[in-house]
Amino acid sequence: MENKKLYKVLIVEDNLGQAEALKKCIEKDAAFSILRIVDNSSDAFKLVKTGLPDVMIVDLNLADGNGLSLLKEVRNIKKSLPIVPYIVVTTMFDSDEIRYIISEGHANFLLSKKSKSYSPEEILDHLQMMTISFYRNKYNDVEKDNSELEREEMIRTRIESELNQYYIDHTRRGKIFLAELIYRIYNTPPTTTIKIANFHADVAKMFNVENYAVEQAVRRMIISAFTKTAAEDLRVAYKPYISMNGTPPSSKEFIMYVANKLRDENL
């Protein structure tokens, strides 16, 4: 089975040069593909209604008017969307109106084009950090109330911070698979006998890849983490490392260790 990119990005930008630069940058990451580039809110809204994009990058200064109208339309139909897209807003100005956009939930993240740090790479960096939020939206088949979603977000964020202690390439799919495996085992009763192959199969089905693709990607990620992370950092992050003589743990050992560590925190 051919591996597919996980997240489709819709770019809403009427400056073709900026749109193409952003497209080229984002497509360097194996997790993302560009669904389309559109220069107006009408075409963008049609694509959102079909549930195609996982992420929208919206420039407020569009040729057919302020992109704020698009954000309001998306917010109004959130409950009827197959996938609620994560929204990144880019703009040339900063004002109380922009802060209102964020506070009212019209967008998830705001980037000012006037900022010295603004670049396509900055946008990609943010997308890479937020992948946990993307796949929670994309694969959440069961209706959950706000308290459940908040708890899930807290646990996934804690998993992310735990993995950030290691030298892990955030642009690779192995990290996404690894985080999902840890989350699933964390939610499995501690008395259950863990057959890691079954969890690999579940995650493979979730992301539409072969079982071996998950197993290999996670194994490569763990080997990379334990090869490239400084030994003194490993001794702090992974207690068993002290007696391991530098040998990376098995995938199951590492996943179980992180899941049990989080259980002990009583999240």
Image (spheres, grey):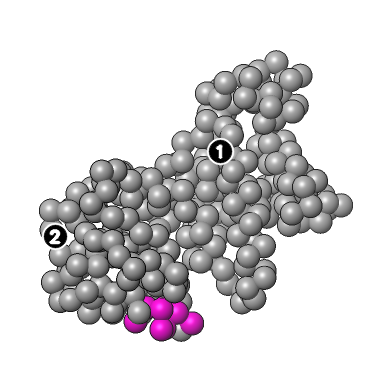
Looking at the image, the residue that sits furthest to the right is: 191
Q: Position of residue 122 (x, y in %)?
A: 33, 46
Q: Nearer the viewer, residue 249 or 264?
A: 264
For residue 218, side relative to residue 197 (left or right) = left
Q: Tell me which secondary structure the magenta stretch mostly adopts.
A: helix
| Quadrant of the rendered image containing residue 76 | bottom left
Distance Cα–Cα, label 1 vs label 2 = 35 Å
Q: Which residue is mark 1?
A: 164
For residue 239, side relative to residue 226 (left or right) = right
Magenta stretch holds residue 77: yes
Q: Position of residue 199 (x, y in %)?
A: 66, 52
Residue range corresponding to the magenta coloring: 73-79
Q: Position of residue 62 (x, y in %)?
A: 18, 70
Q: Are marks 1 and 2 in contact (CB under 8 Å)?
A: no
Q: Looking at the image, is 120 positioned above or below residue 135? A: above
Q: Amino acid at mark 1?
A: Asn
Quadrant including the C terminus? bottom right
| Quadrant of the rendered image containing residue 216 | top right
Q: Looking at the image, is 256 positioned above or below residue 57? A: above
Label 2 secondary element: loop
Q: Nearer the viewer, residue 237 or 202?
A: 237
Label 2 packing within 10 angstroms: few (<14), some (14-19), many (20+): some
| Quadrant of the rendered image containing residue 38 | bottom left
Q: Which residue is mark 2?
A: 15
The disc label shown at residue 230, or none: none
Q: Amino acid at mark 2?
A: Asn
Q: Residue at x 71, y 51 (%)?
A: 185
Magenta stretch holds residue 184: no
